[in-house]
Amino acid sequence: MPEGVIVKALSGYYYVKPLREGKISPEDEIVQCRARGIFKKRGQSPLVGDRVIYSLTENGEGTVDELHPRDSELIRPPVANVTLAVLLFSVREPDLNLQLLDKFLVHIEHSGLDTIIVLTKRDLAEEDGEGIAHVKELYERIGYEVMVTSSRTGSGSEELRKRLAGVISVFAGQSGVGKSSLLNRLVPGLSLETSEISMRLGRGRHTTRHVELMDIGDGGYVADTPGFSQLDFLELGVEELSSCFREFVPFAAECKFRGCSHLHEPGCRVIEAWEAGEISDSRYEHYKLFFNEMKDKKRRY
């Protein structure tokens, strides 16, 4: 039975790219498939990124017969077997929003994926090189990989393409930061629809309609996703929040009280580290903000 990877799901159809020797075959044609009814009975739903066993039907289409176990699964966007999250945030238009960036990082840490932070639109902030360097240093000190790109000039695009070789990655970020423009740079001839920024609203119009794995060469595939502007913490327990701030973890293990909230307890090593400058003000402030936001939601639901 042939095996493949679902590269697109749309209107009840699953578009499967065949696997050869365990790798997605760029030469083989995509097979349009329906899923067997057994998945519905099991409460399963095939996802983009799923490795599947499929069979061909007489009309040249196919049927998804079986799903292989997933290495990872994201609910929003609905995609499986991603190993790398690429978080795109612009330095201008819209301005860099560190609170939203930290919110994304919390969710990505919780999902267990590796992360690259990509700062886009470098060409719009030539005079603010110092500010960009500060943000880059802040997150690299925590242990995140940070790249700076410009879709207009092409700077950073080749470096990012090399980094994405051989893995399935997911692009996510604030709407209007230039995801489609960057993907058009990474994949010449792709011509994804892009939209101008609405300066009045400070965000772009949503131009991505569905999740699809795009071949960017060298065995790399990118899942482009609808532009996010809202995330919530309902699927994340408040007791898990501090472990999603990776620089808190070594200090939290030394706190005086088990289950320390890192807000007011005596003997809290996280607070001590923050006061000593070992944890940045912005990261600690965002932690407190998210903690209280989660508490409020828990009381309401």
Image: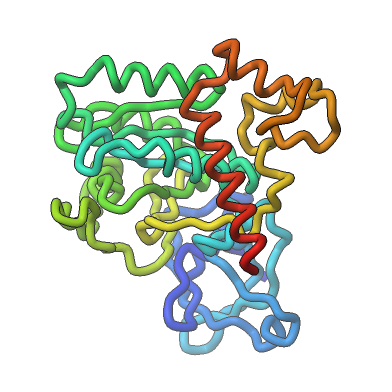
- The image quadrant of residue 235 is bottom right
- Residue 18 showing in the rendered view: no
Vertically, is 192 above or below 108?
below
Residue sticking out furthest to the top: 276
- Looking at the image, residue 228 sits to the left or right of residue 150; the answer is right
Indicate left or right for 67 with 227 as reference: right
User: Viewed as shown, does residue 56 lie left or right of 129?
Assistant: right
The residue positioned 45% from the left and 20% from the top of the image is 138
Q: Quadrant of residue 123?
A: top left
| Residue ID at (45%, 61%) | 28
Query: Residue 211, image x and y in percent?
Result: 43, 64
Quadrant assignment, res 98 = top left
Q: Nearer the viewer, residue 147 or 219?
A: 147
Tell which of 97 and 141 is nearer to you. 97
Spot occupied by residue 33 in the image (x, y as percentages of width and height)? 52, 79
Q: Quadrant of the N terminus?
A: bottom right
Q: Residue at x 23, y 17 (%)?
A: 129
In this rendered view, identify the residue nearer to me: 243 or 19: 243
The colour scheme applied to this rendered structure is rainbow
Percent x, y of residue 65: 67, 77
Does residue 195 appear in this view?
A: yes
Position of 59 relative to 211 (above/below)? below
Q: Give the x, y percent position of residue 186.
A: 30, 41
Name the residue rendered at 37%, 45% in the picture. Answer: 216
Picture quarter with the C terminus: bottom right
- Number of numbered discs present? 0
